[in-house]
Amino acid sequence: QVQLVESGGGLIQPGGSLRLSCAVSGGTFNRYIMAWFRQAPGKERNLVAGVSPSGRTLYEDAAKGRFTVSRDNAKNTVYLQMHALRPDDTAVYSCTADEALSAVIGRGSAYYGSWGQGTQVPVSS
């Protein structure tokens, strides 16, 4: 069973930077597409960024140019580096693994199986 544990969230001022980490245990991390989703209060959970085992990436439009997703297969960890944070980035950020070994990085949550508990990122002055 794949387990995911996020860390690195917390209150951040607008314009600030934050790096989220997601440590994965169980399963075969280096075969999974990994992704970060976020859910703002009262809104649906949406993909922020995904990364394939080979390092290919996919970003939602609001994340392009500000966020970078990466992975360290030796540490079974996926990261989300966020810069120039805005109040509308406020959300619970969750990482997830595509255990079905899809050929493409899916934009919908249905592509993914196991999820972390999420970490809150409030962006406010």
Image (cartoon, rainbow, N blue to C red):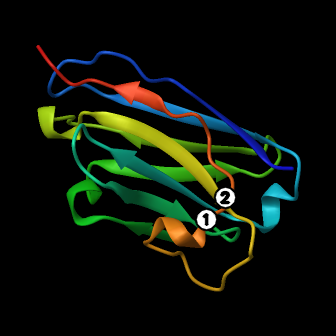
Identified by mark 2, the residue type is Ala
Q: Where's residue 88, x and y in %?
A: 15, 39
Q: Where's residue 59, x and y in %?
A: 37, 65
Q: Secondary structure at mark 2?
A: strand
Q: Where's residue 37, x and y in %?
A: 43, 52
Q: Is residue 53 above or below residue 117?
A: below
Q: Earlier in the sequence, mark 2 or mark 1?
A: 2
Residue drawn 24% across the image and 37% down it: 41
Q: Residues within 10 Å of mark 1 (few under 14, many from 20)?
A: many
* Nearer the camera: disc 2 or disc 1: 1
Residue drawn 68% across the image and 71% down it: 54
Left or right: where does residue 13 sit relative to residue 70? left
Q: Is residue 101 above or below residue 124?
A: below
| Residue 82 placement: quadrant | top left
What residue is pinned by disc 2? 97
Q: Which mark is residue 74?
A: none
Identified by mark 1, the residue type is Tyr
Left or right: where does residue 14 sit relative to residue 29? left
Marks 2 and 1 in Cβ contact (< 8 Å): yes
Residue drawn 23% across the image and 65% down it: 61
**Foreground residue, 15 or 43?**
43
Q: Residues within 10 Å of mark 2 (few under 14, many from 20)?
A: many
Q: Report the Cα–Cα distance between label 2 and label 1.
A: 6 Å
Q: Quadrant of the C terminus?
A: top left
Left or right: where does residue 86 sit relative to residue 12? left
Q: Secondary structure at mark 1?
A: loop
Q: Is residue 85 above or below residue 31?
A: above
Which residue sits furthest bottom? 103
Q: Which mark is residue 112?
A: 1
